[in-house]
Image (spheres, rainbow, N blue to C red):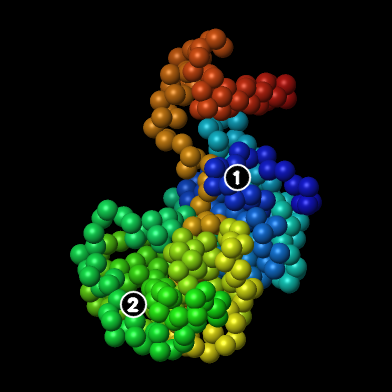
Amino acid sequence: MASDYQPVHRLSKKARKNGWNLFLWGHSATAGTCMRLHGGINLGRFHFLTTASLCRWIGLFSSPTDTFDLRPINVVPDPGGFLAYFEQKTNLPALNDKPFEHPIPGDYAAFRNAQSPPPVLSPWCYNADHPEWSRALVPLKGAPTMQKMNESEFKHAHAHLDVMPDYMEDLVRKRSHSCSITGRHDSGVSQTLSVVWIVHPTHCRFASDFFSSYSWTETEDEIKTFVVPENAILLRPDVAGAFRENAFGIDVDDNYRIVQFIDLPALELPSHVPEAQKAHLEPSADKFLRFHFMWCLRVNICGGHVMDDFDRGEVLGMMEELGLTGSGSEMAPVTDPRWKTEIGKICWEMAMNSRFASDKEKDKC
């Protein structure tokens, strides 16, 4: 795949907003070859990113034993499906073969390698027909920002545990008198800095369980494991706001690199947490900073499948109205105004591609 790569698949709003040019596709969980986009990267933003670090980011969401190779694939539109795509294998080498190089734009999927555990084979699972496929990308699911979660109207039964105790705030302020990330503060008065949670205690299950699902069933004892000084840091108010919006995160496994997911010129963030500030962090804070970074990845590079922009019921209803469901009804005339709607335009393209594919098959006979 070359640097002038242009995707053949329709981009979702999230993909367009973030300028993705590397796409991470998950194999279908059922029989068949349909693909689902599970994430993407704007390689121009992450100049430091290597194949090894990309695979490590993906690995944060899966079991440590679920090793995989990230291989280039060709994504091909399914002429009979609404924004459906399937994969064609390529003979190109896996990205893992050059772990310290910057990835190149293109479409990629995860495949099992020699270190992968034996696949679970069953007739209703894709592994039965494709034992080489890996599910490593499936856990990459999008998420709202921490700030949106905090603003949710739903009140957690243990919401009182999100209120930081005074003694804990005092402990955090005694650790340092400057911003835990930048090492600076604006006014020279430490009290202008904010003590904030790295991860709100009531979000503990969402943060720690590989982000597999969100549940409001956390026990009070589980939540209290997050009500600790190691889960709190001292930040400038402007930095704290961007931190809660998951606009940046700290990759503790890359020497505390500060990864910016959007442009934040006003904050003047350093490339890494300064050594002096790292010395003030509790050693066990790494766990909570890693949870926050995983959340940032979910907000900014996970999800983004184009069908997430559409209501499936509305799509199916429009296809039926336009006579594209294969139920014997005639296709609506070209003059029907419904062809001019966003869904209608996609349906028209699908109908034309399907007819073209059918004609090609007839020509072979």
Residue at x-position 31% and y-position 79%: 227
Residue 226: which numbered mark, if any? 2
> Residue at position x 34%, y 77% from top?
226
Q: Which of these two is toward me, 329 or 108?
A: 108
- Residue 192 vs 83, above or below: the answer is below
> Could you tell me which secondary element the residue under label 2 belongs to?
loop
The reply to whether residue 200 is in sight is: yes
**Residue 176 placement, left or right of 46:** left
List the single residue furthest toward the left. 157
Q: Is residue 359 left or right of residue 184?
A: right
Q: Position of residue 163 (x, y in %)?
A: 27, 72
Q: Quadrant of residue 173?
A: bottom left
Residue 38 on image: x %, y %: 53, 53
Amino acid, disc 2: Phe
Task: Name the side, left or right, on which 170 lies relative to 277.
Answer: left
Q: At 52% from the left edge and 61% from the top edge, which residue is drawn?
A: 247
